[in-house]
Image: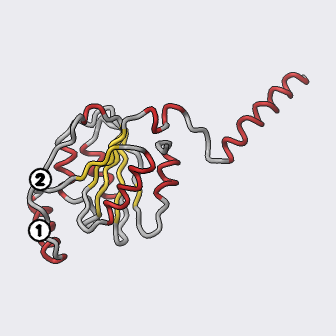
Amino acid sequence: MKLIFALMLSLGLTVAPALAIGGFRTAEASAANHKILVAYFSWGGTTERIAQRIRQETDGTLFKIEPSNPYPTKYQACTDRASKEVAEKARPAIKSQVEGMDGYDVVFVGFPIWWYNAPMIIDTFLESYDFSGKTVIPFCTSGGSPIGVAMDKIRLHCPNSKVLDGLTANGGANVEAWVQRLGYGK
């Protein structure tokens, strides 16, 4: 009986500290064991700043999703074009492609929320590659809309992927803590 009690006490002393600091971090989930891509589309620079923070936290590769035909820099002209793209279910062409996409097993995908969803260029990006077997982690920036509808779009385009819940990085979002909770921080 004393032996069983000693074993249980030993196990409790081993497990309790790990649970107190947020659980176990398995070797499988650490950034060192994964090739990580941080792909993002940013119109005004906000999403780009979040992507850079994720890249720094994960030591991943940064890829900017740029349209072949850049969006207008004036807000109203940009929203007019984006609204037309949604109505037409357009697939804006992307300026360049990810080199060695097959080698990445974790892909963060970032974008601003436009009309409660990801911009149509994100559809183009997701349809351009095979995400089968990859872990896809969406993140967005928004003036107040959540990532919910965009998550449906991501899951639709990545049916054979593990799609993790995304982050809406409004205001003072602690991006680094989020990446650590996911298990992909360095």
Task: Residue 102 in the image: state x and y as whole percent.
Answer: 26, 32
* Residue type at tag 2: Arg
Where residue 133 sits, quadrant-wise, is: top left
Foreground of the two, 61 or 178: 61
Q: In the shown orientation, is residue 135 left or right of residue 87?
A: right
> In this figure, which residue is indicated by the disc labeled 1?
81
* Residue type at tag 1: Arg
Where residue 18 sits, quadrant-wise, is: top right
Residue drawn 29% across the image and 63% down it = 112
How many C-alpha atoms fall within 10 Å of the one at disc 1: few (<14), some, or many (≥20)? few
> In this figure, which residue is indicated by the disc labeled 2?
91
Q: Earlier in the sequence, mark 1 or mark 2?
A: 1
Measure the alpha-carbon separation of dots 1 and 2.
12 Å
Residue drawn 35% across the image and 61% down it = 49
Label 2: element kind: loop
Where residue 106 sits, quadrant-wise, is: top left
Foreground of the two, 44 or 129: 44
Task: Residue 32 in the image: state x and y as whole percent.
Answer: 46, 35
Up the image or down, 127 lies above or below 6; here it is: below
Residue drawn 37% across the image and 43% down it = 60
Label 1: element kind: helix
